[in-house]
Image (cartoon, rainbow, N blue to C red):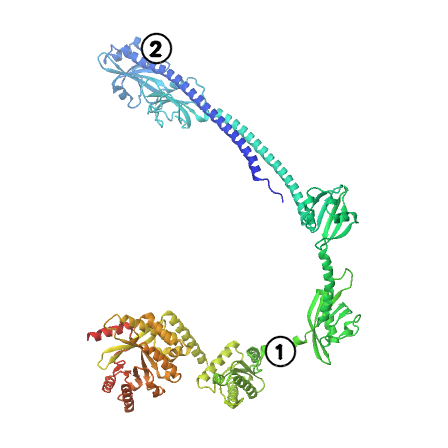
Amino acid sequence: MNKPLPRRITAFVYGVAALFLGAVLSIAALTMWQTYQKAIAESESEAKRFVGASEAALNRSLLAVDMLLAGMGQFLRKSTEASVASDIAQPDTAQLVETIVRQSLLVRYLAFLNPDGTVVGSSDRRGAGLAVQLPDGFLKELLNRPASLLAISAPSVSLATSQQVLYFGRVLRLADGSRLVAVAEVQVSMLTTILAQGASIKGLEVTLERDAGPLLASMPPRDDLAGRAISPAVTDQVSDGRPRRMNARLSGTPAIVVARPTLYRNLLIVASIPLEVALEDWRRERDLILSTALAFTLMILAVSYFAHLQLRRQWRSRGDLLRSKATLDQALESMADGFVLLDPDGRIVTWNRRFVDYFPWTETLLSTRATFQQIDDQNVRHLQAQNEQELTLPNGQVILAVKSPTPDGGLVCVYRDVTEKRRHLADILEGKAQLQATLDALPDVLLEAGIDGRCYRFHSPRRPRSSIRVREPVGKLMSELLPANAAAEVMVALRDAFEFGFSSGRQFESRGPKGALWFEISVSRMAVGEGADARFIVILRNITDSKLAAREIEHLAFYDILTGLPNRRLLLHRLQASIDSNIRRSRHGALLFLDLDDFKTLNDALGHAVGDELLKQVAVRLQGSLGEGSTVARLGGDEFVVLLENLNEDPAIAAMQTNASGEAILTGLNQSFQLENHQYHSTCSIGAVVFNATHQSLEDLLKQADIAMYYAKSAGGNALRFFETAMQTAITARATLESELHAALEGGQFLLHYQSQVTSEGHIVGAEVLIRWHHPEKGLVQPGGFIELAEETGLIVPIGMWVLETACVQLERWSHDPRRRHLQLAVNVSARQFRSDDFVDRICEVIRRTGADPTRLKLELTESLLQDKVTETIGKMQLLAAMGIHFSMDDFGTGYSSLSYMTQLPLNQIKVDKFFVQNIGIDPKVELIIQAIIGMAHNLDLEIVAEGVETHQQFEFLQAHGAMLCQGYLFSRPVPIEQFEAQLDVAMAD
């Protein structure tokens, strides 16, 4: 790949070009600026000269008219107001006035007017009959002047000629002091001629105008502007005779403007030369300069571009040379062989690094261009030898040296390391021997065969049982070597390999005196020369052991290892087949789901080995209890499933058939089992579901049978129950309730209600906390709606801890209130919660975390705790009692515990169950039991709390017989904490 020209060279070339371009553009810009200034200066000088000449000519003309008018005053100095008209009308006078006017080139006629505007005489033949229409206000302006000075009117149209004219007027004083106005009419075109002065300046605009007043005359004529003020007005600062840059007075285009005042006040001459005209010659010069600069620019760019191309070509040529040399050097250095080039004199011209690696002691002599003979004796011998020679180096390397002459008489010497080649050859020989040993060790039959099945080479393993033994197989056909079925499979495999290059997976069985052997055929097409017959390598592998193992695996995949019964997988397969059969034949089937009763107890008592023996015997009895067309499967543990097929098409009869089979199973399993040295009597619970061409999934059928079995077991076991939709509904509702309980615990939906405990005098000394569930949809749910499920699922433990912690938090709050710090709270503790291993630790943690006084906490336990693990129960109670926690025996008298433990338990209180309380006044026997319980509590120094007190009769009976505390609707229902504290406030106020 060609490297680009370095940026510094490119930058230099185009930098020089940029300098030249800058110089050309600078010179062009400077020249244009100078010519521009020159053109402007010439136009300004021309305008100044013109204005000066025009001013002089106009001053002479205006002065002549002024003198003419003033002379009329001298001429009429003796006339009076009464005689002036007749004086002017005298022939001699009229002739003289007419002659004087004709001598003036500007004045068309001269008229004399009274102050009221009446013409009293004129230079016209009409005399006083001449009609003179002066511009509005002009006569008044003349008369109002304090001095008799020349005044010029605004342009107006002459009634006689319809041309633009100006009126020059002057007030004359008569002999009697009256005034007479002399007016001369001057054509604007005549003034324009004087203004132009024959100037030939292209585009010149000349105006005669008053200072900040109307336009009087212009060249070229502009009748549309006559008498109108031109904006902007020419001020004293502008009318100093110096050139200005402003808009032309007539066309409004940018121009060079020169304004000069005349001899008469506020009368200005303004000359405008448009810049477009003033710079016309400069633009031609500018275009010439730009064309020249562009030509120089293009020439510089072309020269720099071609210079850059030439430098790039030279750089590429240099790069090609360097790359060629680098390529040659790289090729020499990348050669795996050593290389030396000798000139005709035997001197070294070039070499590569590999040569130095082979002969490191020559490195110091190579750069001196020594002769090859001076370097190494071995190389000298090589030069004397013919073409090739093997050299052995001191390190053991074997080098093959090859020499070739060059056209100029030199030599090319190549040194190749053949050490590995020699080793490789030895490895090949060794590998061949190892291959033969490997073939001898292989258990496979290997042979080389043609497409016609003829054997060309044959190798048989040495173990006779695992192979096919054939005498002199070479040259024989497959049909001569193998059984017919095997030969046919091999020929098919040969044809497949001929078409696709490889064949595998075909199998055949070979039977012999020692049994059947299975072989797998693998055929691969050999690479042969063009035109040669196809040859194949055939491998016959003994897969007998694999076949047996596969059959064993298949059995394990579909059958239970312990009992040999079909497993869940095979059961589902047969269940699907049964459903398909029902569709075709309109028959029914049934599933019986069996679970052994108390199997866990047997396992725990006698061990798993005895349990496994029971399962085996159950499997045998189940198979014996059922006829053909039924499947007995084991799902796992002590669960079995019986599939009944081909039942009657009538659902009722099919159910009867199912029931009969189920009863037979119950009867069969109800017989005793001989388990080692033990006689064991077993029962089972069975759930049944009848199906036809159902659209339910297989798992749903199993689930329904399982649900029915659950109901059979719930009924006490040793029973058969058919699945009903209500069962599914109940199970679903139970699962939903369990899920909602989890959500309630996580979402804080539980709350506590408090029911007062009062003394016989009616004082509140505490309360029992009772949990409520604030369901988001069902509202307030009582404990009876969820406590039983919480017990079964284990949720009672976290729920109970929440109740306990909430109660402790409330006790801690009351500890800061002197009126309530004496109150006790009783918390119910379930048996499952109490028996958890960390119950004591968790109670201690709650007390520590909340800061509650443990002496204000009372735990209510049920008698069911005393049915088992009594010692453990007593130990936990003693640990908690040592902390100051009180205990109460809830629902006393309804359980089955032994009274002997009452003296061992650290109890503080006994609660009389509401069953007894509600029968006060109804059943005398119950009243005797209550009296006995109260008496026993007094003797044991225990408090008595009677719960469920609803009537005054009950309360009075309990008071009379020494019940210290009561609790019930008579005093208060369970209420939220706010209402309970309100009750406390009322009680304390009373």
Asked if one can make out residue 545 in the rendered structure from this viewpoint, the answer is yes
- Number of other residues with Cα within 10 Å of mark 1, as a class: few under 14, some 14 to 19, many 20 or more: few
- Number of other residues with Cα within 10 Å of mark 2, as a class: few under 14, some 14 to 19, many 20 or more: few
Numbered badge on residue 832: none
Say whether disc 2 or disc 1 marks the residue closer to the N-terminus.
Answer: 2
Residue shown at 70%/79% (left/top)? 516
Q: Position of residue 247 (x, y in %)?
A: 40, 27
Q: Which residue is mark 2?
A: 99
Q: Of the residues shown, which amino acid type is indicated by label 1?
A: Glu
Q: Which residue is mark 1?
A: 552
Q: With respect to residue 3, does 64 lie above or below? A: above
> Quarter-wise, where is residue 880 in the image?
bottom left
> Quarter-wise, where is residue 941 in the image?
bottom left
Left or right, 261 with reference to 666:
left
Q: Position of residue 721 (x, y in %)?
A: 47, 84
Viewport quadrant of the N terminus: top right
